[in-house]
Amino acid sequence: MHKKIAELEKKQLRDDLPELNIGDHVKVYVKIREGDKIRSHPFEGTLIAKKGSGPRTAFTVRRISFREGAEKVFLMNSPAIEKIDVMKSTKVKRAKIYYLRKRKGKKAIL
């Protein structure tokens, strides 16, 4: 039974997405349905966490807009994600950079 589930999960993996690292400044284009139309809405911010493996991989993107921090968790293999652009890559020494939540202003940007 478990082998069948593992085979199905391998088929669902997406190979069109770039390699993401913690600290990267990314722009995630998400498909949004408005009435009978579907449009693409970008969410731009810093990748602060990744968790899971295989088809269950999720990543958290944090952005600051109007002095308020906003975070979204995206599933890597979700069909709602149209594409992901890596705008800037930075080197960090931690696996999860939750300490950015406490910072304000320019200090909150890597």
Image (cartoon, rainbow, N blue to C red):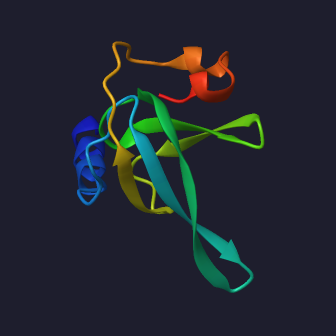
Q: Is residue 53 above or below residue 41?
A: above
**Is residue 95 or residue 51 the one in the foreground?**
95
Horizontal side, residue 34 vs residue 79: left or right: right
Which quarter of the figure is the N terminus placed in? Answer: top left
Q: Residue at x 65, y 85 (%)?
A: 37
Classify residue 13 as left or right of residue 56: left
State the residue at coordinates (23%, 56%).
15
Q: Residue furthest front?
A: 106
Q: Quadrant of residue 103?
A: top right
Image spot of residue 58 (x, y percent): 45, 37
Q: Position of residue 104 (x, y in %)?
A: 69, 22
Q: Is residue 83 left or right of residue 29?
A: left
Rendering coords of residue 44 (x, y %): 54, 50
Above/below status of 24 relative to 79: above
Residue 64: where, in percent of width, then height? 67, 38
Residue drawn where x is 39% and y is 29% of the image: 52
The number of callouts visible is 0
- Judged from this view, the residue extending furthest toward the bottom is 36
- In the rendered view, does 77 fall on the left or right side of 63? left
Q: Depth check: 89 or 79 in front?
A: 89
Residue appearing at x 38%, y 13% in the figure: 94
In this picture, is 61 found above or below 90? below
